[in-house]
Image (tube, helix red, strand yellow):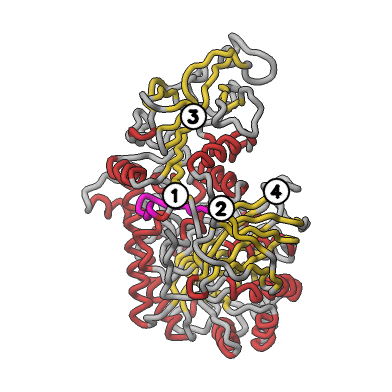
Amino acid sequence: MQNQRRSAVELPFRQIHLDFHTSEAIDGIGADFDPDAFADTLAQAHVNSINVFALCHHGWLYYDTEAFAAYRHPYLETNLLKEQIEACHARGIAAPIYISVQRNQQLMEEHPEWRVMEADGHLFGPGPYEDGFRHLLCLNSPYVAWLKALVSDVMASVPVDGFWFDIVDARDCSCHFCRQGMLAQGVEPSRVEDRMVYARQVLDTFVHEMSAHVRATKPDALIFYNAGHAGPHHRPILDAFSHLELESLPSGGWGYLHFPIAARFVRNLGVDYLGMTGKFHTSWGDFHSYKNEAALAFECYHMLALNAKVCVGDQLHPRGVLDPATYDLIGKVYAQVEAKEPWCAGAEPVVDIGVLTPEEADPALHRNDVDFRPMMGVVRMLQEGKHQFDMIDSQSDFGRYRVLVLPDKVPVGDVLAAKLQAYVDAGGAVIASFASGMNPDQTAFTWDALGVTLTGEGPRDPSGALARGREYTAHNYAEYLLPRDGLATGLPATEHAMTMRGMEVAAAEGTEVLADVVAPYFDRSYKHFCSHRQAPSSGRVTHPGVVQNGRVIYFSHPIFSQYQTKAPRWCRVLFLNALERLLPDPRVWVEAPTAAIATLNRQPDLNRQVLHLLHYVPERRGEAFDVVEDVVPLYGVRVSIKVDGPIGRVALVPQGEPLTFDLQDGRVVFTVPKVEGHQMVEIA
């Protein structure tokens, strides 16, 4: 039941992504660059890999070239890229090369016919009098030939460890080239569904052709294509990558839940990967701003805890000098990362639970369009409960997990239904909620093991305009969940408000009802309303809210989306109570506040397990994003871990301090005296 990840590429642990998007309105580019000082600064900060720039979003090149001389930055005063790479290589620091793919301000101006066109005929991105380079070039246009020629020129001009291709994503495009391509395939370009399918084909073709182009000259090159997210849609194109990287700056729009969602999926794809945050207080290009050291430490140590290598984003000043304050900050954290590496190298997750991601069925092409609420809600709950889990998809090996969770909207067709049934028949257990287990149209349940049938659409707001699973704001709608004794542990014996409408279901014969839905007096409208928000409970039970059919539990409400939206404690308690019915002996038990995170890994080559305990508390101090500043230590953290054999040593690492422990009923029990931010414990 353990992960068997073995990657052909092993990435360095301590990396930098050095942005260098530099305007033509600035002169003296690289004028103060000193190769030795540049590389020495990196080495002193414990950096062992850095992405350096060939081509930026502005469309400028940062190396000497005859073939593309028109695109060399007009004020570049040194052969910057070549000197950076050579200085890094002299100190054993890898230096993959950055190339901006779909953003290029110069080519956008020269070749507007190469730009992504929206369905209404407008070119994607800002207008001609707006600042920024948020336009996109189409990967189905003649631009690709230009880009391949540039890549060849780079390989002929500088030493190459690999390529970091940025802004490479499937896009809904209606340009001339895409319309003609779809018509040639016999699909209708006016249909958004057909355009979405074709967009993924275009991406697939581009990454495979570009990787083949690179590997023809440099077979062992590192190759990565960045889209700001990685998930199930990477499976068909994974062979074009040497590894994966997860750009996820918590203060830059990703938040603190994006990384664990992506990491817990990617770590099981069989390739090495890294997480990427930034040194910036906010996000990319936030010059002369600095992340709190506690925040940077949390983000980097969380990567280690989830089996990732570490990367921190920075941006080089136009004159070519690294900021000493930035590398003092990074160096403090990277010194600790280096000390922790021996307990992270080759580590694999030890898990009980697999969460089927709704993202697999989400048609969205871009991260910003994906509904992450169900995934974020379940990640919050499981992290707060200290459970060990992966994010998985329908292609994953279900047999690795003791429990599967289908959060809120995982559609189930015939193939998945059969796979789930075989899993349950073999002794597995499942928790599903809301529309999970239904057909994509949410008109019927397609997996009988849930033990429910759909009897109606559930209460609706008076206008009928709000879709199932959406929170009621205009009419302050709610219904109430009344848990029965088997599910109510830790909650008052009363009704609990559910502000996202659930499915109206009936329990099949032999199915146990664990909670009932109680209706309000009425839905709030101008005709009848009560007090400030929804009407109170009428006391009238309408249908089951939670049921159990053998090893399968179903929640009729979108409890994970509701928890992500407003974090009602009762949703988490009800879910964890249900989970305990199916998983009474979780692999890891930790007595610590809900803000603490616990992950268990194993190093099979060293025959040991490593527990990571993290306690950092993100706070919404400003309006825009969460920050971490204070490290509040925990004392006397009690831990119990299920083990498969004899244990000879439990110790704090990297400190090397042994802990006393007991073996009780197949579990090793010990107390960690202090957790100050991050503490690892070796069990061997």
Query: Residue at image x 50%, y 43%?
Result: 371
Which residues are the magenta region?
A: 388-399
**Residue 598 versus residue 10: which sits nearer the camera?**
598
The numbered mark, 4 or 3, whose residue comes first in the sequence reads 3
Query: Residue at image x 52%, y 84%?
Result: 64
Which amino acid lies under the numbered mark 1 shown in the image of this protein?
Arg
Query: Residue at image x 52%, y 16%?
Result: 541
The numbered mark, 2 or 1, whose residue comes first in the sequence reads 2
Q: Secondary structure at mark 1?
A: loop
Query: Tag on residue 402?
Result: 1
Residue occupied by mark 4 = 593
Q: Nearer the viewer, mark 4 or mark 2?
A: 4
**Residue 412 versus residue 17: which sits nearer the camera?**
412
The numbered mark, 1 or 4, whose residue comes first in the sequence reads 1
- Residue 20 visible in the current orientation: no
The numbered mark, 4 or 2, whose residue comes first in the sequence reads 2
Which amino acid lies under the numbered mark 2 shown in the image of this protein?
His
Separation of residues labelled 2 and 1 (CA atoms)? 24 Å
Q: Is residue 508 left or right of residue 127?
A: left
Residue 93 position within the rendered picture, expressed as x and y whole percent measured from the top left:
58, 83
Residue 369 position within the rendered picture, expressed as x and y whole percent measured from the top left:
49, 46
Residue occupied by mark 2 = 258
Q: Nearer the viewer, mark 2 or mark 3?
A: 3
Outermost residue toward the top?
A: 527
Q: Are marks 4 and 3 in contact (CB under 8 Å)?
A: no
**Residue 156 versus residue 197: which sits nearer the camera?**
197
Separation of residues labelled 1 and 3 (CA atoms)? 21 Å
Residue occupied by mark 3 = 546
Q: Is residue 126 left or right of residue 566?
A: left
Separation of residues labelled 4 and 2 (CA atoms)? 21 Å
User: Label 4 neighbourhood size at 10 Å, few (<14), some (14-19), many (20+)?
Assistant: few
